[in-house]
Image (spheres, helix red, strand yellow):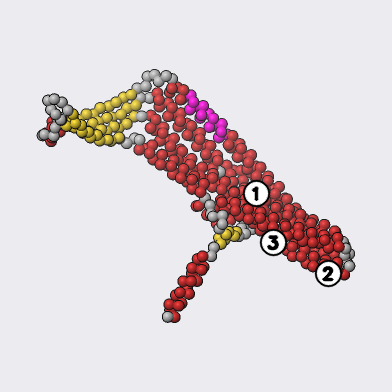
């Protein structure tokens, strides 16, 4: 009985625990890895990659022979023979000996298959940057919440102290009301920041393709701020980005694909040569002596077919002209893509430098206003400054704190985006 009772208790505990919602705790790296495996759009890109690879495999199969079988039975009626059954059976085969567009299609589909891999990598970079934005935004609001909760606690103590001082006549009613107003403002700030954090977490859940109702907690990145501040020179960043970013590879593949299109168009000028074969037999009138009829009527044929284009209403010439234009457009797009990438990476590099400077400045400003606020609070407690002066200094600190948090995580985001561009 004791064993049964223990088993029932364990089962009850298990089901109670299973019924409780679990909380996902994820680092930045875990979020990125999870999204690369579960994001729905990413899965769609992977399916497209598989489709292009299958298309390439199929184009290579076009060199193999076609093989088909035909079987037919029919019944006829005449005055001489009320009903007659006729049948025919055959096997047909065709092997392409020379067909210019087959080689062109194989080359084109191979390039498309290879390009699709880089398109997936391009989406991975875009997805990573979106995750960085949502993750660091949530993390920044989480850090801001901690500071705001500390300020709210101080405001609450100020209201309690102000209530006593107002009762004793040490401060005016207007000063006490200002303290209450500041307390209400600090509570509202916490509510707004929590909402902004939850919105960022919701965006992150969508990027991870998980249920929006799923509880998610994020953890601070392992990377130290000092590590992020180590910035290579601009030329190194640019060289690494041009070597690793898939955007330039994709544009180069477009040039090669357009070149294959020219070859395919020119194949319209060349003849098509194929080897054809046929084995067949049949029977007439009825099924009498069916085996003998099949043997007597057996035929075997083989031949070579050559199709030579002579005049196709200028279609081939027009196709060649259009494909050459597409090739030139692809070359121009490649140059434009490289130029745009250089501009983007250079701008991002300068943004990192500017963001780092802003972060360092706001950090000094925040520390200065924090020390000043502590001094003002002591002076206020001693009665040497007014409530207005205290609250003005407190608002100055809040503004400096907001700037610091924004600049800190803005710098982290821009610095990590630069790492993505560098293939890290």
Q: Residue at x 49, y 68 (%)?
A: 15
Residue 222 seen: no
Q: x and y percent of residue 92 in the render?
A: 25, 33
Majority SS type along the magenta span: helix
Q: Residue at x 61, y 43 (%)?
A: 238
Left/right of residue 304 with respect to residue 265 in the rendered view: left
Left/right of residue 333 with respect to residue 394 in the rendered view: left
Left/right of residue 227 with respect to residue 47 in the rendered view: right
Q: Nearer the viewer, residue 339 or 240?
A: 339
Look at the image and tell me in which quarter the N terminus lies. Answer: bottom left
| Circle on res. 114 | none
Q: Quadrant of residue 387?
A: bottom right
Residue 73 seen: yes
Can you identify the residue that label 1 sits on? 414
Q: Residue at x 44, y 40 (%)?
A: 52
| Circle on res. 146 | 3
Callout 1 secondary element: helix
């Amino acid at each position: 009985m004791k064993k049964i009772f223990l088993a029932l208790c364990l089962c009850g505990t298990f089901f109670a625990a299973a019924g409780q919602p679990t909380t996902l705790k994820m680092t930045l790296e875990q979020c990125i890895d999870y999204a690369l495996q579960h994001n729905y759009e990413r899965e769609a890109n992977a399916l497209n990659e598989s489709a292009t690879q299958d298309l390439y495999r199929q184009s290579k199969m076009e060199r193999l022979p076609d093989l088909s079988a035909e079987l037919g039975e029919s019944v006829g009626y005449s005055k001489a023979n009320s009903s007659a059954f006729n049948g025919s059976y055959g096997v047909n085969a065709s092997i392409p000996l020379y067909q210019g567009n087959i080689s062109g299609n194989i080359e084109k589909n191979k390039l498309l298959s290879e390009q699709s891999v880089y398109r997936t990598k391009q989406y991975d970079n875009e997805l990573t940057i979106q995750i960085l934005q949502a993750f660091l935004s949530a993390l920044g609001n989480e850090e801001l919440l901690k500071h705001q909760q500390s300020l709210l606690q101080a405001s609450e103590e100020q209201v309690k102290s102000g209530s006593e001082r107002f009762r004793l006549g040490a401060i005016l009613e207007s000063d006490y009301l200002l303290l209450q107003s500041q307390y209400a403002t600090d509570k509202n700030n916490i509510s707004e920041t929590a909402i902004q954090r939850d919105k960022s977490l919701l965006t992150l859940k969508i990027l991870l393709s998980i249920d929006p109702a799923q509880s998610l907690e994020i953890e601070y990145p392992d990377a130290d701020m000092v590590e992020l501040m180590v910035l290579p020179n601009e030329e190194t960043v640019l060289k690494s980005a041009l070597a690793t970013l898939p955007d330039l590879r994709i544009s180069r593949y477009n040039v090669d694909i357009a070149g294959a299109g020219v070859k395919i168009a020119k194949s319209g000028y060349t003849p098509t040569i194929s080897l054809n074969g046929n084995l067949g037999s049949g029977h007439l009138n009825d099924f009498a002596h069916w085996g003998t009829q099949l043997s007597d009527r057996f035929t075997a044929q083989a031949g070579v077919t050559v199709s030579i284009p002579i005049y196709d209403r200028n279609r081939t010439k027009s196709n060649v002209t259009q494909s050459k234009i597409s090739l030139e457009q692809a070359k121009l797009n490649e140059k434009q893509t490289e130029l745009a990438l250089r501009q983007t990476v250079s701008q991002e590099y300068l943004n990192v430098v500017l963001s780092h400077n802003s972060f360092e400045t706001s950090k000094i400003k925040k520390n200065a206003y924090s020390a000043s606020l502590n001094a003002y609070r002591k002076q206020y407690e001693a009665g040497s400054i007014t409530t207005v002066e205290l609250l003005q200094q407190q608002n100055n600190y809040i503004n400096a704190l907001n700037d610091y948090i924004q600049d800190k995580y803005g710098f982290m985001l821009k610095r990590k985006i630069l790492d993505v561009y560098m293939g890290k």
